[in-house]
Image (cartoon, helix red, strand yellow):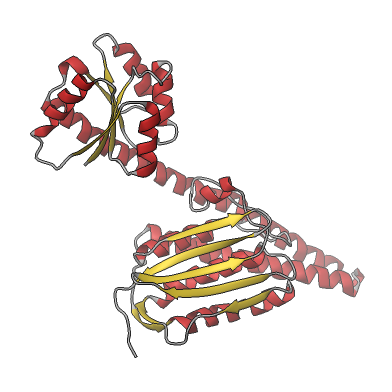
């Protein structure tokens, strides 16, 4: 376990170290003597638990000390280190998100280890429940809004065509047909992602590797978007060597590429360019889908792969999406043992990256 102790008194720190010396588990203690240095450690390392002294010189009030740590890192359990007369304050902070408290004068190995283990287990359970609730909320949001709206528009358009067909000009008819085509495409894409996502939630999708040509996969998926790109006057390019072969799941890779290419087309204006490439690195194959479109803010970038945050934005031609496709991409990248992330700058473009491990490499 990696534990951060934010404590400025050497004697109290010594008691904590001695209390954990007899633990059967390997425990790595990192000490910070202020809120500022604690936050710096949290930026640089991953911790399983935080032991936080409430009375720190740079913390302000005890509540401010807690909030400075808890607000940026709510998923890490915090155990408060308190004085004997801090019970009411500790209980108030537990209501605000702390997991437990230990009175410094009463620290002993058994109670401290028990509190740490219990707090880690409880916050992980809370995180799982939070994710499940977010998943449920996302599902109902899609069913109630993202699916209902395009179906309503589709229904209204077909009803108008049925009633007023003979009275509509050829231009009006073409406009209605274009709207129907776009809505049908959006509904199909949504349902495909929704069904795929639901299968990942039930553990029905696994990585089934085979020997595949990565250049062929990229080119094949680019060809699927040739018409969409041409309609927006967008150039699609790739530079993946023909000899790039891997032992991986072509369906999972293709699904990620389709979502990323489709997104890039949505958010790239007429005359833009989308580049899809793959690099052979020592540890993995590194794919990138780069566009010179509208880009996104830092806040949107941070929330891209979070199911509990709605990051939907209209495309350059008012194309609609739910953000679910990126959640599917993240799930599939994880299933293959890879990673996915993005870089972006407003009005300059976005680059999505994902990797697939080299569990096996083909040599020609």
Q: Is residue 291 shown to the viewer in this render? A: yes
In the image shown, does 186 or 297 lie closer to the viewer? 297
Q: Is residue 322 shown to the viewer in this render? A: no
Q: Position of residue 223 (x, y in %)?
A: 59, 81
Which residue is most to the bottom?
A: 364
In the image shown, does 267 or 252 lie closer to the viewer? 267
Which residue is most to the top?
A: 85
Q: Position of residue 200 (x, y in %)?
A: 40, 61
Which part of the image, by quadrant, shows the N terminus?
A: top left
Q: Position of residue 183 (x, y in %)?
A: 68, 65
21 over 353 or under it: above or below? above
Where residue 282 sits, quadrant-wise, is bottom left
In the image shown, does 69 or 17 lie closer to the viewer? 17
350 over 239 or under it: above or below? above
Q: Position of residue 152 (x, y in %)?
A: 69, 57
Where residue 356 sits, quadrant-wise, is bottom left
Residue at 16 percent of width and 21 percent of height: 107
Which part of the image, by quadrant, shows the C terminus?
A: bottom left
Q: Is residue 190 left or right of residue 5?
A: right
Q: Is residue 274 left or right of residue 13?
A: right
121 over 98 or under it: above or below? below
* Mark count: 0
Residue at 21 percent of width and 18 percent of height: 104
In the image shown, does 235 or 159 lie closer to the viewer? 235
110 over 153 or under it: above or below? above
């Amino acid at each position: 376990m990696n534990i951060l102790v934010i404590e400025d008194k050497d004697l109290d720190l010594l008691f904590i170290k001695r209390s954990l010396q007899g633990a059967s588990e390997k425990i790595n203690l990192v000490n910070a003597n202020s809120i500022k240095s604690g936050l710096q450690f949290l930026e640089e390392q991953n911790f399983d638990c935080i032991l936080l002294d409430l009375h720190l010189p740079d913390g302000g009030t005890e509540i401010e000390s807690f909030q400075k740590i808890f607000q940026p890192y709510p998923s890490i359990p915090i155990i408060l280190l308190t004085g004997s007369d801090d019970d009411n304050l500790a209980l108030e902070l537990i209501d605000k998100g702390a997991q437990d408290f230990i009175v410094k004068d009463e620290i002993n190995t058994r109670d401290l280890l028990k509190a740490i283990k219990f707090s880690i287990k409880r916050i992980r359970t809370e995180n799982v429940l939070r994710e499940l609730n977010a998943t449920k909320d996302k599902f109902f949001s899609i069913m109630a809004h993202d699916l209902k709206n395009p179906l309503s528009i589709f229904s209204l358009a077909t009803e108008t065509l049925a009633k007023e067909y003979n009275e509509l000009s050829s231009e009006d008819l073409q406009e209605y047909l274009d709207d129907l085509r776009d809505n049908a495409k959006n509904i199909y894409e949504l349902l495909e992602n929704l069904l795929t996502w639901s299968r990942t939630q039930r553990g029905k999708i696994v990585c089934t590797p085979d020997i595949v040509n990565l250049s062929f996969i990229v080119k094949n998926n680019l060809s699927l978007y040739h018409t969409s790109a041409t309609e927006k006057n967008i150039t699609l390019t790739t530079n993946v060597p023909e000899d790039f072969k891997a032992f991986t799941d072509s369906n999972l890779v293709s699904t990620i590429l389709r979502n990323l290419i489709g997104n890039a087309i949505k958010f790239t204006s007429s005359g833009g360019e989308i580049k899809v490439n793959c690099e052979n690195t020592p540890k993995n194959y590194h794919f990138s889908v780069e566009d010179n479109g509208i880009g996104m803010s830092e806040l949107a970038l941070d929330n891209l792969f979070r199911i509990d945050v709605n990051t939907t934005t209209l495309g350059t031609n008012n194309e609609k999406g739910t953000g679910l496709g990126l959640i599917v991409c993240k799930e599939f990248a994880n299933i293959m043992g890879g990673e996915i992330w993005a870089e972006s700058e407003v009005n300059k473009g976005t680059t999505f990256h994902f990797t697939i491990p080299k569990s096996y490499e083909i040599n020609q």
